[in-house]
Amino acid sequence: MKIEADLIVERADQLLTLAPGENAKTAEDKLGLVPDGSVAVKGESIVWAGPDREIGRHIVLSAGGKRLNARGKVVTPGFVDSHTHPVFAGSRALEFELRIKGATYQQIAQAGGGIKSTVENTRTASKEDLRDLGLRRLEEMLSLGTTTVEAKSGYGLSVADEIRMLEVLRDLDRKHPVDIVSTFLGAHEIPPEYAGRKQDYVQLVIDEMIPEVASRKLASFCDVFCEEGVFSLEESRRILEKGAELGLRPKLHADELTPLGGSELAAEVGAVSADHLLFASEKGMEMMAEKGVVATLLPGTAFFLFMGRYAPARKMIEKGLAVALATDFNPGSCMTQSLPLITTIACTQMRMTPAECILGITRHAARAIGREDTLGSLEPGKQADLLLLDIPDYRHLSYHFGINHVERVFKKGREVWKRTTCGQQV
């Protein structure tokens, strides 16, 4: 019996299902590449994907259904950006210039810049202004192929302001096609009013912030910036364990600036992902691989901060880690919403292959936010988030950089963005 579909995207030069067979070993095999492929959608879900020559045996188009010819295009799952900070006010363009002139990220922070300056601007912005800013940023992400984002709080750093940030994220999730998976990051920095009283702030996060966030069901995850001068391993463990106790799964900013041991901690607390990881140890990588912790790498941040060092992606892949890629979109250390650009940096600076990068912004990224059962591949039963890319081969996504290759975006089976000669149009 044939399956009915509302939408058929057919004749794609390359269909990347990200649904490989059991024997797939290489990243290229794991793309599930189907030459001259088609995908069928019913409602919000994928119902079939495979060779175009076989679609007639399996699928019948419903009355009023739509066929879309994807000849000359590459069709992929919607991209998943698994580490972002999209709700903030103000700009840190001056800090960018100061770094060009030789100031370090830490020096800028010590002088009152960095995260603290964004906290000040975000606290004084109205909820409406934060929503408007967030909507514009999400629309840019959507135009670049991102259909799901993990979004963190962390620019409030008080009970009321952290709740307000998470409420803005909830409102944006309801208003915009891009799905938002929220993460509580109250342990992002020590706010100015707690200078010299870090333990008091840690206790505030544990005793008041986390219970309030959990009771209001405003976040899925709890994250900590585990780093020298910010939150120690012991403090991070206490915060993450409290979050887990109340249903917030742990994530971790780990080993970004120093080899503190965040990757080991991520494995010990059963984190869904550990992110950054420029200084991750051999032991930490092995522990993460054993515990199934996703390594979310943010090469745009190392690029933007002139760090001269990138996470050891090749070593991680060799050790069997699932490597996700994300933008880390934020005003201070990576002001971009472009996952395609991130893949180019990953290729050129971390020697990841184009296929590994596609895995990193689809299947592995979905796993990094706990949504691997519904996102990240074009398989029957999964959410119908898919892209038409105007490129002849998937490698061009990373190879031909600095322009937008996205032609159409479908979210839950509905076209939500398309390119025209005059710009975007839905």
Image (cartoon, rainbow, N blue to C red):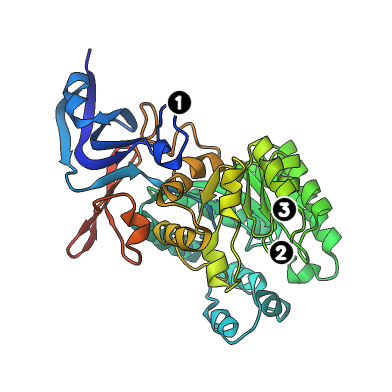
> The N terminus is located in which quarter?
top left
Mark 3 Cα within 10 Å, few/some/many (few <14, many 20+)?
some
- Residue 281, which numbered label? 3
In the structure shown, which secondary structural element does the residue marked by tag 2 occupy? loop
Q: Is residue 300 above or below residue 388?
A: below
Mark 2 Cα within 10 Å, few/some/many (few <14, many 20+)?
many
Q: Which residue is mark 1?
A: 22
CA distance for labels 1 and 3: 31 Å
In the structure shown, which secondary structural element does the residue marked by tag 3 occupy? loop
CA distance for labels 3 and 2: 24 Å
Name the residue rendered at 45%, 33% in the picture. 374
x, y percentage for residue 328? Answer: 54, 59
In the rendered structure, the answer to whether residue 25 lies left or right of residue 307 reads left
Farthest residue, direction top:
1
Q: Earlier in the sequence, mark 2 or mark 1?
A: 1
CA distance for labels 2 and 1: 44 Å
